[in-house]
Structure formats: structure tokens, C-alpha cells
Image (cartoon, helix red, strand yellow):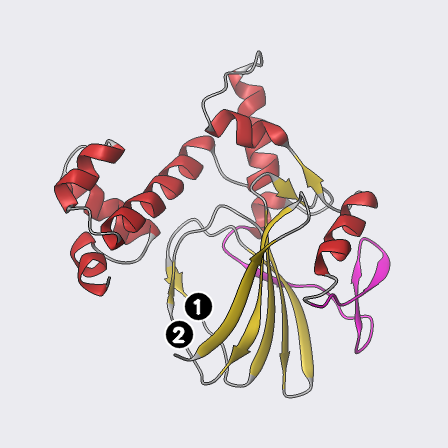
Amino acid sequence: MSLIFEERPSDSEYADAITWGHSLSDGTPMRPAETNWHLVLIRHQGDVRLVLVGPWTTSGMATYEANAEILWVRLKLGTFIPHLPTRKLLDTETDLPLAGNRSFWLKGAAWQFPTAENVDTFINRLAKEDILAYDPLIHDVLRGYTPDLAARTIRGRFLRATGLSRGLVYQIQRAKQAAELLRQGTSILDTVDTLGYYDQPHLTRELKRFIGYTPAQITLSK
């Protein structure tokens, strides 16, 4: 294993999970498509980067170098940074400008880099300063709630918070569910039936697009 890491749920209502650890060697693993925004702090050979990552509309290759320390914040779906152009940040990793060895610039202010111990407080401070925002409509709509809003308004809210359409968010989430079912031993045909894919070729196309592997590859790797 080239990555050693720990993960815990976030104590902040704006984030899902906190992951921290280090890399033992260079790596280029396959990464899935991603609906959530991430903040990633990377320390490597005396250099430091704070990177705003994703969402990713398709699967692709991630890269990391050996002997890097990594702190990874997965923001909650619907959490975003209002003053940044969401659509222009899709499928990219954006380095936030440094203010020194221990801090970075964001919305005209210098912020100290977080640690695994204080990162939840750091996230909450960003929200308090209106640098982070959360749109609960995203969660509600994806779970079947039908708000009394025009379809155009809902579409605009999704694009503002995630950069993605509601349909694309659903496709990515469904593909991840399918991959998990296959890893748990569910057959390919049962996975097709359970999640409402048209047929096995449809499932294969979606998994290749959003997970990076075919159903057979996922089944064999479990």
C-alpha cells in the first residue's frame, strides 16, 4: 500500500469527512467522478499547497508523490465557496495563493493552514465569514423532496452549489452505489435490476465513465 491514512466523520455541518496521512511512494491511482468539493493540504519536501479540488465529471487518474503529508477535507454535497466561479472550477485542481509558510489567501484575508485536530473549527470559521455556504435544497431534492420552485430555479441552485446538473449528480451517485454493490458480491445482473439500469451494457458504460472500471473488473478486485 502506497498511502497510509486515517479517516473520521467531520464535526462540522459543512463537511462529510476528514482524512489525513502520508504517501510511501509515488502513485497514480484511478479516481472516480466526484460530486463534492474538497480542500486538500499537501506538504512535501518543505513545500506546502492548499488545493481546491473538483467536482470531477468523469473518472481519471490521480497523482501523488512519495513522502507527502496530506490532509483532505471532503465538503458536504451542497457546500460551496460563493465568491468563486463554480462552473469554471470543474475538473480542476486550483492552488490557493500562499500568504507565507503557514498561511494562505482566501477572499482577501490570510488564513492559517488547518491541522487534523482543528480542521473542523477551521471549516466552521470559513462558514461564519461567509466564505463557505451550504444549500440544503441539494440534499432535499436528491432524496425525493419536490419543492414549490420552478424547475429553472432548482437547476440554477444545483449549478451554483455543485457546478453539475441534478441529472449528472444522480448518475455519479448511482454509479458509486453500483460499484459498492459489486464489491459486496451482488451479481452484475442484480445490480442492473436494483439500480434501474437498462441493461448490462448501460451499467458498463456508466461505470467506465464515472468509476473508471468495468463491472467485471470491480467484481474481480473485491
In terms of depth relative to the viewer, which is nearer, 19 or 48? 19
Which secondary structure, mark 1? loop
Q: Are marks 2 and 1 in contact (CB under 8 Å)?
A: yes
Residue 142 in view of the camera: yes
Residue 222 image offset from top left, x and y in percent: 24, 62
Residue 83 image offset from top left, x and y in percent: 74, 44
Amino acid type at circle 1 is: Ala
Residue bounds of the magenta highlight = 90-115
Above or below, 52 against 138 in this view is below
Residues at marks 2 and 1, CA–CA distance in whole angstroms: 5 Å
Magenta-span inclusion, residue 102 = yes
Magenta-span inclusion, residue 182 = no
Q: Residue furthest bottom?
A: 45
In terms of depth relative to the viewer, which is nearer, 17 or 98? 17
Residue 88 image offset from top left, x and y in percent: 58, 49
Which secondary structure, mark 2? loop
Q: Quadrant of residue 118?
A: bottom right
Q: Which mark is residue 51?
A: none
Q: Residue at x 39, y 74 (%)?
A: 28
Residue marked by disc 1: 62
211 to the left or right of 12: left
Amino acid type at circle 2 is: Thr
Residue 104 image offset from top left, x and y in percent: 78, 66
Residue marked by disc 2: 28
